[in-house]
Image (cartoon, rainbow, N blue to C red):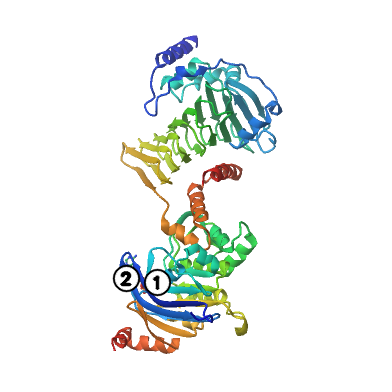
Amino acid sequence: MFEEIKIRQEKAKAAEGKKAAIGADIDLTKFESQDTSKPKHVATSSIPQGDRNKILATGVTLDDVSQRSGTFVQIDNAPMHAAVTQDGIEVMATSEALTKYAWLKDYYWKAVAVDADKYTAHVESHNADGYFMRALPGVKSVFPVQACLYLARGKSIQDVHNIIIAEEGSELHIITGCSTAGREPGVHLGISEFFIKKGAKVTFTMIHSWSPETEVRPRTAAIIEQDGLFMSNYVIMRPVHSLQAYPSARCVGENATVRFNSVVVATPGSTIDLGSRAFLNAKGARTEMVARTISTGGDIISRGYIEANEPETKGHLECRGLILGDRGTIHAIPEIKGTRAGVDLSHEAAVGKIAEEEVEYLMARGLTRDESTAAIIRGFLKVDIQGLPAMLNEEMQRAVKSSEKELF
Amino acid sequence: MDKENLLEIDNLFVSVDDREILHGLNLAVKPGETNVIFGPNGGGKTTLLMTIMGFPRYKVLSGKIYFKGQDVTEMPVDERARLGIGISFQRPPVVRGVKTRDMVLACLKQDDNDALVNELAERAHMTSFLGRDINSSFSGGEIKRSEMLQLLAQGPDLALLDEPESGVDLENIALIGELINEVLGKTHPIRERSRSGLIISHTGHILDYVNARTGYVLCGGQIICDGDPRDILNTIKEKGYQECVACLKK
Ligand SMILES: Nc1ncnc2c1ncn2[C@@H]1O[C@H](COP(=O)(O)OP(=O)(O)O)[C@@H](O)[C@H]1O
Ligand SMILES: [Mg+2]
């Protein structure tokens, strides 16, 4: 075991200078690395109201947790609070889970490679904490479990390492919000490793609300077993300096399914390179990816990659983008690759502006030009997400709505 | 301009994509009156309605449009809508993400009134479409019902109906007729009627359900004939539009 840790640390060390395959390179030496910090176990009421309000904007509510099966809060590198209200659901700091469960080492860095790039390496070499969530076999989370990762200290790097396990036949609904306190530059590095066992279902809804100076490099991967379902929904509508993420899902069991939905708005000064990747490595595996992107002056790369390596697999990828205003770019890069007979893959991509004919149709009903445009944009951003609990759907719509007010 | 008229069109010339389509058209509609316009395909009927509604693609080269005594020739489409003009489109666009319910609410100028939306939708047999993207995979008949539903909610003083019966099967045509009568306030006693309509009909079927006062023939970008709608329709049925064209040449 110690041997394994040593090898991992060496790998991380070797990858310290390794630039990511895509996305602008961040010079991490310009930011302050934070010390590891023991989980604090404070009450959420001790978190300042101002911070709580920012956290609330990302769908994480700390004032009333009656509609949540569990709550986790991390500020900078320190887990502050972990609580759970449902039997069979576990929520704790990753460090504590590693102590509690010897077997967890078999999951740690198993979905994401520790030496993928300098960001994964940084998370490893700074002993990042984060959340561990688990649904025991057959247990279904009644309410969503919520987690908040909050970057408070300016000019620093937040390291996070999350592990999510849905045991056989379980169901876990998660909402996570990531936010930042001030407008000072900062870096968020987050590893999330998902393990969806046979017949289990995980919905993961993530709402990001950063500042114009934040650099964000999440590294997410999921392994989905037979008949498992992973549904990832992502919303970013507020400014960020740069964000690059390319979450990856491997369907390793028959009929495993993964769905990615993302809603992205890039404001002037924001560079967002976001994609979703699925490997269909078992018979009957399926994926659907839907990306809706809007540039109001920022730059977006919208990627998608589906690779089907077994027969009877099916995948579809949709990226639609709107450029509003005079500046801004949207670069859609949908890719599909089949390596066997019997795969069924397709994609559609469109980048454009709002159709004048549609605006005029609404205007003919008495809406002003601005009202018509807003209604069409709202509709564009409204992704119908099947299988997402109504409450999470509402949270997502609320996040879209609240940011929309500032944008259009 | 005659103060008696709700709508008055004086010597209107209109081009679409740099092609002149209407060549000096005159027309008037009185309050409470419904008129019907016949004419061959490509004659300019849709162009006329779209111009009255004020869509920018339809450029008025010269002439005037008056509505409620105001010169609206240069008025933007949304202002005309708010002033009391409504249109049912021949081919409305699909607006992805915008639900039929959203459109009805927009027409009602309300943010939220599920009870009323549901009641109107029931009348138009559109209840199951409220949660769907507007016009997305709607059949011909469903489009017409959806358009009538929106007009029902909007309640315009002048309803411009572009071939409300085309693509509608016989069973549903009576329903469309009923909805038109509701939109036009024909369920009220004659004395109280103030709503007016301009209905384009290629086939004339709609006359079996809706009473119209005057019929016009629009051909080659001009109104070439007016009279009793049934007489005109009978002539067209017997002799085709060739007769109208010949009549124009005289
Ligand atoms: N979008 C368009 N671009 C160019 N020409 C058009 C367009 N729409 C209609 N037209 C032309 O304008 C003329 C009148 O069309 P329209 O008003 O649609 O006639 P109607 O409704 O009587 O069938 C036709 O010759 C038609 O080809
Ligand atoms: Mg027409």
**Tag 2 and tag 1, C-beta contact below 8 Å:** no
First of labels 2, 1 by sequence position: 2
Front tag of 2 and 1: 2
Front residue of B43/A332: it is B43
Q: In the image, is B170 to the left or to the right of A100?
A: left
Query: Horizontal and vertical percent for residue B56?
Result: 41, 63
Which residue is disc 2 drawn over?
Answer: B20
Q: Is residue A31 visible?
A: yes
Identified by mark 2, the residue type is Glu
Q: Is residue B163 visible?
A: no
Front residue of A164/B37: it is B37
Residue at the spot 52% in from the left edge and 44% down from the top edge: A407
Q: Are marks 2 and 1 on the same chain?
A: yes
Front residue of B150/B173: it is B150
Q: Which mark is residue B46?
A: 1
Q: In the image, is B225 to the left or to the right of B70?
A: left
Residue B82, quarter of the rendered image = bottom right
Query: Horizontal and vertical percent for residue A167?
Result: 55, 30
Identified by mark 1, the residue type is Thr
For ligand 1, give the image quadrant.
Answer: bottom left
